[in-house]
Amino acid sequence: MKIGIFGGSFNPPHKMHKHIAISLIKNHYVDKVIFVPTGSKYKYKNNLLSDKVRLEMLELMCKDNNNLEVSDYELKEKVVYTYETLDYFKNKYKNDEIYFICGTDNLSYIDKWQRGKYLLSNYKLLIIKRNSFEITSILEKYKDYKDNIIVTDIEENEISSTKIREMIYNNKRAETYLDKDVSDYITRNKLYIK
């Protein structure tokens, strides 16, 4: 089986996240996608909701699809790096292939990540194109790892968790970008409001 690992802050998880996962499955890039929310100890994100809340929103988003899972592996008292997460799943699913789902924005500087070259050497990356990033020069930069970089034909639109948080904060309707259960959860728990 081919398993895609989809990391992110998921603050909140939205329809584009789910669309990417389902499209990867439908187009036979992977058989299953595991969402792995970033722990709140990650220093580059300072406005994260609690680990528990983001995990619960992801679980609501994935509950009706047997090919989508959620893992709390990175929700620890210390920072967990992507290479550690991928090693964990590789060890857990010894007979399966592990793929890392990555946007062109992250790919552009993945060599600067903790053990980034190890990650590029040891794992296959499924690249989701983002309109604002020119892929050719990025691929040229990583030509030594070209066999591990698979550019999918799936594109991400410009909706983002940041934009959704801003909309909710400014009393604008964001439901169209969210699964109904996630939207209801945000409303019920008064998340992202002033």
Image (tube, rainbow, N blue to C red):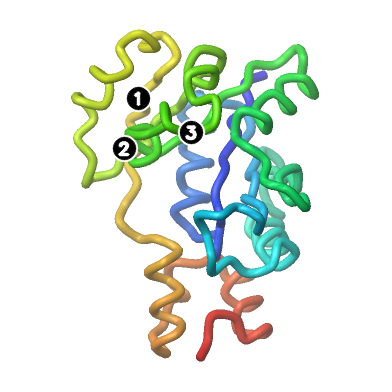
Is 81 situated above or below 96?
A: below
Q: Amino acid at mark 3?
A: Trp
Is 140 situated above or below 88?
A: above
> Residue 172 occupies which quadrant of the picture?
bottom left
Reading the image, the residue beneath label 2 is 129
Quadrant of image for the N terminus: top right
Q: Which mark is residue 187?
A: none
Please provide percent x and percent y for residue 137.
19, 25
Marks 2 and 1 sit apart, C-alpha to C-alpha, by 8 Å
Residue at image point 71% right, 42% down: 66
Mark 2 neighbour density, 10 Å: few (under 14) some (14–19) many (20 or more) = many
Residue at image point 39% right, 12% down: 145
Q: Amino acid at mark 2?
A: Lys
Residue 66 or residue 33, whichever sits in front: 33
Residue 78 or residue 23, whichever sits in front: 78
Please provide percent x and percent y for residue 123.
55, 18
Residue at image point 65% right, 59% down: 40
> Residue 30 occupies which quadrant of the picture?
top right
Contact flag, marks 3 and 2 (Cβ < 8 Å): no
Q: Mark 3 or mark 1, which has the lower sequence index?
A: 3
Is 66 situated above or below 191?
A: above
Contact flag, marks 2 and 1 (Cβ < 8 Å): yes
